Amino acid sequence: MPITGGGTILLQNNDKGVTINPSNTYTGNSNIKFAVYGKSFFNEQVNIFDVQSTSTNYALYVNGMNGNPAIYINAATSQPAIYANGTIYATSYEYISKSSNFKSNFGDLPNSLDKILSLQTQSFTYQTNKYPDENLPTGIQYEYSVNEFEKVFPELISRDSNDLALNTSALQPFIVEAIKEQQVIIESQSEQINNLQEQINELSVLVDNQTLNTDNSNLINYSTPILYQNTPNPYTNQTTIKYSLPDNTSNSFIKIYNISGVEIQSIELQNQKGQNNITIDASNLESGIFAYTLIVNNQVVDTKTMVISKK
């Protein structure tokens, strides 16, 4: 039996209340049939109350047939499709239409990690005793802090005269991109750590071989020549210059120059592979600043400065 008219309609039954079968067709779309069709203007509303009983009851029970949606809601522009005062339960997944037919202006989500890290969270409890008619959930609840949320994602906040709502579902793409950005950082840092570990291992081998015996240093396969700073420096009588020669060394020298660039001494190293050292005697040298250069296979490797200070 169709029911029309304004005012209040009260239909009661001990078990099922009212059963309405779809028969009419929505005038805006011939493919949509409905059991209940209504429009809300100004402050009109539909109130449906559940049966007060200790058993399971529903204020509204809709059974979708033949694979069709049980409920279709077409909200007004910028208005909520559903306003629920209480917890929403679902026995299946939430699916959101992602058809690109209605969309344009696609873009990336840069700096997602910084945005997510800027958010703050907090726990709270509802004042159920103060607002007993609001059907507020009990126990500890969790939420984003509104102040930080609004600073980072102002477009995801909806306000009206009485309430404020956060579109937390829209955060999911940002969270995915933040994880990707973080993974890039992790992989980069992991590579740096591995490189540093390799360098530490190489240095450890050098130190171990150097502390065992300088005679064993020839066992190391040096790939490039190295000139070290002399010790001590400054010196009065003698100083030691360490150097390393690669396996492919055919000729090698350490040459000493005065401050004017004049060569005053040339020491042939006799192609001693690996790490070795020579001792410079200052007995025939005056106080001053000198340069010494390592030359390997007729190529200048490095030049360093030493100071002779005689009292």
Image (tube, helix red, strand yellow):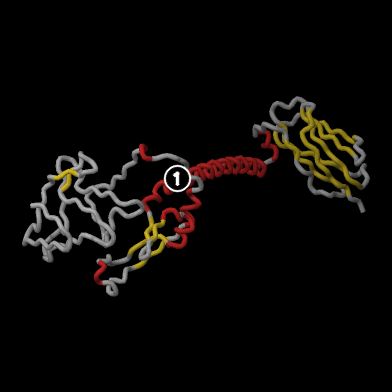
The residue at the far left in this view is: 14
Q: Residue at x 27, y 59 (%)?
A: 84
Tell me residue 203's x, y (percent): 63, 42
Name which residue type carries label 1: Glu
Tell me residue 197's x, y (percent): 56, 43
Q: Quadrant of the C terminus?
A: bottom right
Horizontal side of residue 151 vs 244, given as left or right: left
In front: 81, or 207? 81
**How many neighbours does mark 1 have within 10 angstroms: few (below 14), some (14-19), or many (20 or more)?**
some
Residue that carries the numbered disc 1 in the rendered image: 177
Q: Residue at x 91, y 44 (%)?
A: 283
- Examine the rendered structure and indicate whether residue 56 appears above or below residue 255: below
In front: 103, or 260? 103
Dot 1 falls on a residue whose secondary structure is: helix
Q: Residue 5 sits in which quadrant?
A: bottom left
In front: 212, or 309? 309
Horizontal side of residue 183 vs 199, given as left or right: left
Horizontal side of residue 21 vs 238, given as left or right: left
The residue at the far bottom in this view is: 130
Tell me residue 137's x, y (percent): 27, 65
Looking at the rendered structure, the number of numbered marks drawn on it comes to: 1
Q: Residue 295 sits in which quadrant?
A: top right
Tell me residue 89's x, y (percent): 24, 55
In front: 114, or 243? 114
Q: Residue at x 48, y 49 (%)?
A: 113
